[in-house]
Image (tube, helix red, strand yellow):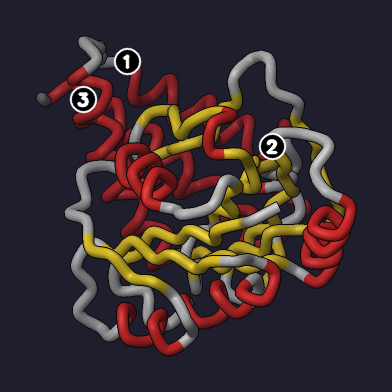
Amino acid sequence: MKISLVVIAKNEAEKISACIGSAADLVDEVLVVDSGSTDGTQALAESMGARVVFRAFNGHIEQKNAAADEARNEWVLSLDADEQLDERARQEMQRLKAEGPSASAYGWNRLNHYGQQAIRHGAWYPDRKLRLWKKTAGSWQGQNPHDKWVPMASEKVVWLKGHILHYSFNGPQEHRKQAERFAEIAAVAMHGQGRRSAWFRPYLHGGLRWVRDYLWLGGFLDGKAGWQIAGINAWEAFEKYRRLGKI
């Protein structure tokens, strides 16, 4: 079972070492597809044994599919630069390497962090992600910027123990900046698909998103962070449809 760890990155010097370090000893290749970092990300990755290639960024889905195609091995472990495998997830990979695969794709629950607080409720948990798979078993799909790896219907999927640790934001300011960026990307993507937005849709989608994340999915159980996350998620949903209506 030959595995390539594949990471797409741009200006991830703060986090790329922890990402690679969490899995480098479990894989047969480390590949970083960089889209023009200026903070030394490439040198850090190369210092940890990664093969670094440049590819201009033209969308999360497109970038991840191109990165998977660039991998030299049959199996791909795909992590974002701000993600790491925890020890239990590492043990599961060690077991797979020793016993051999019984499925075509494997995944874990992703444990998102807000600063150093683990978020265990709301829309952010369990946040299941397929991240270890045969290159021929599926592809990255979805709607930019929200990509997901989708297996072909005939392929077997197994969920493993442990977590992908996701250190996404240091707090609400970083979260808000990303939400603004993602709202714009999503609005453009939806417009390209022929979708349009009526005047009431921003309010409808923003309101429903807040009710779902904070009340229905229990975001309130994460305290202040849960309140902040639900609020910004709702604002992103509102902004996405507001911007769509103005294109």
Q: Secondary structure at mark 2?
A: strand
Foreground residue, 60 or 216? 60
Query: Dot 3: few (<14), some (14–19), or many (≥20) neighbours within 10 Å?
Result: many
Residue type highlighted by circle 1: Phe
Compare residues 102 and 56 and report the one nearer the observer. 102
Q: Which mark is residue 182?
A: none
Q: If you read the primary sequence from the N terminus, does the residue marked by circle 1 or circle 2 appear first?
A: 2
Q: CA distance from mark 1 to mark 2?
A: 40 Å
Q: Tell me if label 3 and label 2 are in contact, CB under 8 Å.
A: no
On the image, the x and y values in percent for residue 113 come to 63, 65
Residue type of the residue flagged with mark 3: Leu
- The disc, 3 or 2, on the residue closer to the chain's N-terminal end is 2
Q: Position of residue 115 (x, y in %)?
A: 57, 74
Q: Residue furthest left?
A: 247
Disc assigned to residue 105: 2
Q: Nearer the viewer, mark 3 or mark 2?
A: 2
Circle 2 packing at 10 Å, graded few (<14), some (14-19), many (20+), is many
The residue that appears at 17% across and 54% down in the rendered structure is 56
Given residues 117 and 137, the one toward you in this image is 137
Q: Which residue is mark 1?
A: 200
Q: Which of label 1 and label 3 is nearer to you?
A: 3
Residue at image location 38% in from the left, 29% down from the top: 143
Label 1 crowd (10 A; few <14 / some 14-19 / many >=20): few
Q: Amino acid at mark 2?
A: Ala
Res. 244 mark: 3
Name which residue lies at 46% across and 54% down.
72
Q: Residue at x 83, y 48 (%)?
A: 100
